[in-house]
Image (cartoon, grey):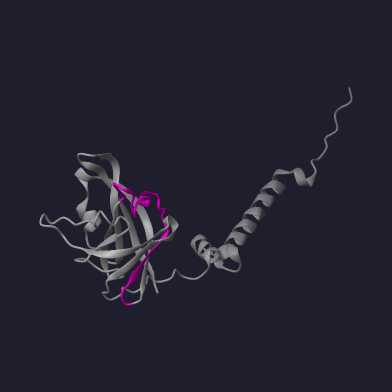
Amino acid sequence: MAPRRYRRRPWYRTRAYRLVRTALLTVVLVTVVSRCGAGGGAAGHRPDAVAAARAGGGDPAPPPRPLPRSRPTSFRVRSLGIDAPVTPLRLDRNRRLETPPVDTPKLVGWYQGGPTPGEAGTAIAVGHRDTRTGPAVFAGLAQVPPGRPIEVGRADGRTAVYSVDRVEVYDKAGFPDKEVYGPTGRPELRVITCGGLFSRRTGYTSNVVVYAHLTATR
């Protein structure tokens, strides 16, 4: 039997070639990543900068400056079809906030002992969900989506525009007074109405609270 002839491997299949190729690829990749991270095109931006550029570019707009005191005159939530006049409210003898008159279900109440719309601090607006005659001004308040504007007109002709942050439903027995009514470092708004189950003897079991903050004035 004739001996098998030894064939040399092609140069591109040798172990030495594979090692050199791997080293060169590593150098190339490191160089490309370094250049992308150092600047240039979009690949050089930080992810947050790219997101900001896509959203409109530049830094976010600064918050509006608080407005001086001026009583509210109108309350609008266009997404819910609300455009209502405003009446001032006080605390009753038990130190509880009054509600607007039942015979005017489309009226919004504003706690006059607190900030007016646009002022620094927590402003409070309340209204009925319904009355014996049917739905009232805040019948659909629980359905307002986050981000929707709430516009409050003022006696001085200015308008305070708030954006909804979130909507919460609290049982009346465990209502978080400090969280809802407590002071804040920026102009904020709480809009309150009834919620939960209804009983003719005790009324509604819960409260709906909309949290919002000032995002514009005009």
Magenta-highlighted residues: 129-156
The residue nearer to you, when weighing 51 against 177, is 177
Tell whether position 146 is magenta: yes
The residue nearer to you, when weighing 166 against 11, is 166
Residue 157, horizontal then vertical, whole percent? 35, 76
The residue nearer to you, when weighing 207 against 23, is 207
In the rendered structure, the answer to whether residue 195 lies left or right of residue 35 reads left
Q: Residue 111 sits in which quadrant?
A: bottom left
Residue 131, horizontal then vertical, whole percent? 29, 48
Residue 205, horizontal then vertical, whole percent? 25, 42
* 134 versus 62 height, above or below: above
* 49 versus 142 height, above or below: below
The residue nearer to you, when weighing 101 against 72, is 101
Tell which residue pokes out farthest to the left in this image. 93
Q: Residue 110 sits in which quadrant?
A: bottom left
Tell whether position 5 is magenta: no
Residue 30, horizontal then vertical, whole percent? 59, 58
* 76 versus 4 height, above or below: below
Q: Residue 87 sits in which quadrant?
A: bottom left
